Image: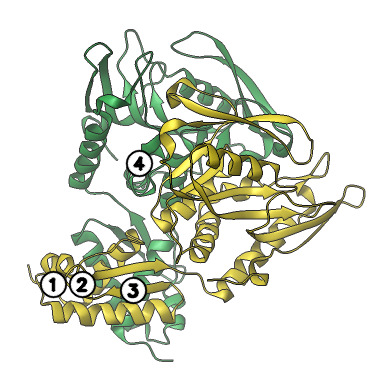
Chain colours: A green, B yellow
Amino acid sequence: MKWKRSERLVDMTYYLLEHPHQLIPLTYFSETYQSAKSSISEDLAIVKETFEEKGIGMLMTVPGAAGGVKYIPKTSDQEVKEIIQTLITELSQSDRLLPGGYLFMTDLLGNPELMNRVGKVFASIYANQQIDVIMTVATKGISIAHSIARHLNIPVVVVRRDSKVTEGSTVSINYVSGSSRRIQTMVLSKRSMKSGQRVLITDDFMKVGGTMNGMKNLLEEFDCELAGIAVLVEAEHAGETLVDDYYSLVKLHAVNEKDRTIALSEGNYFLKERT
Amino acid sequence: MKWKRSERLVDMTYYLLEHPHQLIPLTYFSETYQSAKSSISEDLAIVKETFEEKGIGMLMTVPGAAGGVKYIPKTSDQEVKEIIQTLITELSQSDRLLPGGYLFMTDLLGNPELMNRVGKVFASIYANQQIDVIMTVATKGISIAHSIARHLNIPVVVVRRDSKVTEGSTVSINYVSGSSRRIQTMVLSKRSMKSGQRVLITDDFMKVGGTMNGMKNLLEEFDCELAGIAVLVEAEHAGETLVDDYYSLVKLHAVNEKDRTIALSEGNYFLKERT
């Protein structure tokens, strides 16, 4: 079957979006569509221009025999601003306030469209770096981790609080939770990571950073390297944060349980230099 | 700015794929692209034909003033067969065998591309039904749940084993786990679901179905209705399964710890009538 350009553009767009951060040889497209490489190159130029114009992402062309094309998801600054604004509006609702000054966020973490957008933001930040694995701790960070992973095309590993028979042999560490100063345990299946891998850590919420620091220590047990830290909401607190090189989208300043108000602002996303 | 058809096709494809199961008015496209509705209709006809030709999904057109177009993700039978074959090949590897006859599957559940495909399969099955929420139990089913949710555009709720302060007030039930006959607890935030919602339950593994049955009981506490059950791997066992109307992709027949062999076959996906 001979494909028309219009059909090729639709199918190519689908295929590229489904295979982020994967090098696709031009021959794949020319064979699939029974078309000359010159036509495919013209198609890709249109896709590239539209992706960049609309802030969908970049199309990287790698020349040569082992070359091809790679879709790199990217979120424009304007869209990041919109996402942050959505998060702040949502999180400011006074009925999110829980006893003890906690914020109810579970519904946002269960919203697939929002999580997809959040994941793309973090994937954009780390798009030009070598990241081999995303790590999070059960349960609430898992949706963010999977969404980042989908856009970077790398696996997710989930640290648990307890060891389970279905994980096989595990590595376990003790760490001190930042705010409560309690000793806690983290467990990760031995098969999760190989030594030398570069790991991006993510979670939904960070205060002092005890959990993040725990994951950092766990990385060391696997001879892996910390590549970055991505949190949805960071909370202001007295004293030092245990980790320093992180990105956050939203910052929680204070909650007032009596007036039922929640003070939030942009996280550090726009304050940091990006590579 | 005036858009060319080729650019419209690329951007429209992206927009539709990002908004599954959402009715998009034609005016959205005609305003975005500054194009006549007749041109937009022609564009959509090309997208529709390509989506259907390539097994990407369906494009449903709703006529009238309140009408528009809706992308329904669908997986072709051939692709389902490929996914099942991939899963069987992966799961047959003898190094997945854990003490006690358990199978190590965590890496597959952490593979975003595979989970995306699996989620699309289950979303295809339930594409024509009213589903309001996807429910799973922490931790291993979460990646499947989110992938289904992304393709159906509905929220995920995660049942936990223990109650946590960040969940607010919760509903808790006791249930009997199927294989071990132990009493276990399930907890779900009260805000997770509204009465009358139709819920799809999912998990990575099911033997007797005790956990599934527990979630079914939990639904009743919320006055919600069971819309379906989707499991990645079901395991053969003596006696009755506690739930009956489920879909599975893979069936585990037996493991032999001495010979280190794992006997697997297709699940019931192709055995069941689909609506």
Disc on the earlier residue, 3 or 2: 2
Spot the residue most to the bottom.
A1
Q: Name the element at disc 4.
A: helix
The reply to whether residue B23 is in sight is yes
Which of A137 and A261 lies nearest the eye of the viewer?
A: A261
Q: Residue B8 carries which label?
A: 2
Residue A166 falls in image quadrant: top right
Disc on the earlier residue, 2 or 1: 1
Are dots 1 and 4 in contact, CB under 8 Å?
no
Q: Distance between the residues labelled 3 and 1?
A: 24 Å
Labels 3, 1: front one: 3
Answer yes or no: are tags 3 and 1 on the same subunit: yes
Q: Callout 3: 10 Å neighbours few (<14), some, many (20+)?
A: some
Left or right position of A254 against A214: left
Q: Callout 2: 10 Å neighbours few (<14), some, many (20+)?
A: many
Identify residue for label 4. Answer: A122
Left or right position of A233 against A85: right
Q: Residue B3 carries which label?
A: 1
Give the amino acid type for the residue marked by disc 3 in the picture.
Answer: Met
Identify residue for label 3. Answer: B60
Question: Residue, x 42% and y 54% (percent of image)?
Answer: B150
